[in-house]
Image (spheres, rainbow, N blue to C red):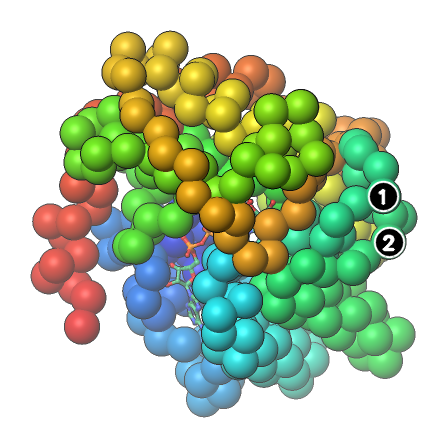
Amino acid sequence: MAILVTGGAGYIGSHTVAELLDRGEKVIILDSLKKGHHAAVLAEPFYQGDVRDQDLLKRIFSEHEVDAVLHFAADSLVGESVQDPLKYYDNNVVSAQRLLTAMVEHGVKKIVFSSTAAVYGEPEQVPIEEHSPTRPASPYGETKRVIEKMMEWSEKAYGLEYISLRYFNAAGAHPKGHIGEDHDPETHLIPLVLQVALGKREAISIFGDDYPTPDGTCIRDYIHVTDLAQAHWLAVDHLRRGKGSAIYNLGNGNGYSVKEVIDTARKVTGHAIPAIMVPRRGGDPAVLIASSGKAKRELGWHPQYEKLEEIIRSAWEWHQSHPDGYQDVTVLTKK
Ligand SMILES: NC(=O)c1ccc[n+]([C@@H]2O[C@H](COP(=O)([O-])OP(=O)(O)OC[C@H]3O[C@@H](n4cnc5c(N)ncnc54)[C@H](O)[C@@H]3O)[C@@H](O)[C@H]2O)c1
Ligand SMILES: O=c1ccn([C@@H]2O[C@H](COP(=O)(O)OP(=O)(O)O[C@H]3O[C@H](CO)[C@@H](O)[C@H](O)[C@H]3O)[C@@H](O)[C@H]2O)c(=O)[nH]1
């Protein structure tokens, strides 16, 4: 049986495909390449297309024996979603609805979904547990919560089983050096800070220093991308063993402020990394830190990267060896 990976040419999707291949899984990738990269497609068959394309979904499910779907494909930028919420309802909610419909029609009963810490909004207490209230502070987080509800109702109605993985902030790159983070435009803190160290940007902007945190900047929980990848295979295995639907946080349990990230990157790169203070970005909660005990207990998840310094060093190795990301290859393939 094969696993269909939507968004498998993207950052977390490609690292997860690498993990699945290491585990001997048969993988099918579906990605529009609007954000992903041909060079990050690690498995065949690869379908370049949109998850909203119902005919394409039908074709894939008819041509292959798929028992589980890993659904990464989405738009995922908190700030952009505040500016353009309808884009997020379209690409995230409509895609998921069509994917679930096709799965039900073809008798595919297992899905692992890329959810997010952004479903919680401003938490009442940290570390955040899975039963904490969900009050998304951005349309992005809201669309992910809607999809979680869609899966819950689909379980009751059609017997579809799901695992929703609420990742905190993904960072780092594969230790083999062949895949890493390359978003265009880049909006994530760690790669932007490293672009300054590479001399590709003059300074990093800090979005607000008036948050209720010790140094006034937002605190996030950074989790290594290969640790996320490991959790996905464990989640598929969990469903295959009949353990049923569940929601898991995936984070390190350690929070670092924007200023601490910049300081750590200065240490790792040896570069001064100038920073400038700018106003807050819309939709950003002050503090997001995970409790991931449930994933460790129930999935047997063992994250390998604990320290922010190790995570930033892993990202730095990728950015140094690929200063222009996958650029040379994607110029040829992106239309
Ligand atoms: N990066 C993070 O820190 C983070 C944290 C929490 C959750 N997530 C979630 O994880 C998933 C992957 O994130 P990422 O950082 O790897 O993003 P990414 O943009 O690198 O990957 C997403 C991939 O999906 C593809 N895609 C998007 N919409 C599509 C569609 N309609 N049809 C086909 N392909 C489509 C893109 O081309 C891209 O390759 C997303 O669902 C995101 O919301 C990411
Ligand atoms: O130039 C920058 C970029 C970011 N930040 C701040 O750095 C923190 C991290 O921002 P970013 O790297 O953009 O990640 P998030 O907005 O926290 O969102 C990421 O992490 C979420 C889970 O917490 C996921 O759901 C999202 O998909 C993913 O983009 C936030 O406080 C930002 O305000 C800056 O100060 N300057």
In the rendered image, the vertical position of residue 301 relative to residue 155, given as above or below: above
Residue 94 x/y as whole percent: 57, 81
Of the residues under marks 1 and 2, which one precedes in the sequence?
A: 1
Q: Is residue 111 left or right of residue 325?
A: right
Which percent across, then down, holds residue 237? 69, 45
Left or right position of 331 against 255 = left
Q: Are marks 1 and 2 in contact (CB under 8 Å)?
A: yes
Q: Is residue 239 left or right of residue 24?
A: right
Q: Split into 4 quadrants, where in the image is the N terminus?
A: bottom right
Note whether residue 293 is visible: yes
Name which residue type carries label 2: Pro
Mark 2 and ligand 2: say if the CB distance to the nearest ligand atom is below 8 Å. no
Residue pointed to by mark 2: 133
| Residue at disc 2, secondary structure | loop
The residue labelled by disc 1 is 124
In the rendered view, would you say 77 is above or below 56? above
Residue at 79%, 75% in the rendered image: 154
Image spot of residue 224 (x, y percent): 52, 30
Q: How far apart, in angstroms, are the residues tagged by discs 1 and 2? A: 8 Å
Picture coordinates of residue 180 (x, y %)? 34, 38
Q: Nearer the viewer, residue 256 or 292?
A: 256
Q: Residue at x 10, y 61 (%)?
A: 332
Q: Is 146 rendered above or below residue 115? A: below
Compared with residue 38, is residue 294 higher up or lower down, i.e. above or below?
above
Secondary structure at numbered mark 1:
loop
Q: Quadrant of residue 272?
A: top left
Question: Which residue corresponds to the image point at 49% horizontal and 87% vertical from the top-left?
Answer: 54
Out of 157 and 167, give the one closest to the viewer.
167
Tell me the quarter of the image containing the C terminus: bottom left
Tell me which residue sits at (57%, 28%) in the image: 257
Q: Mark on residue 50? A: none
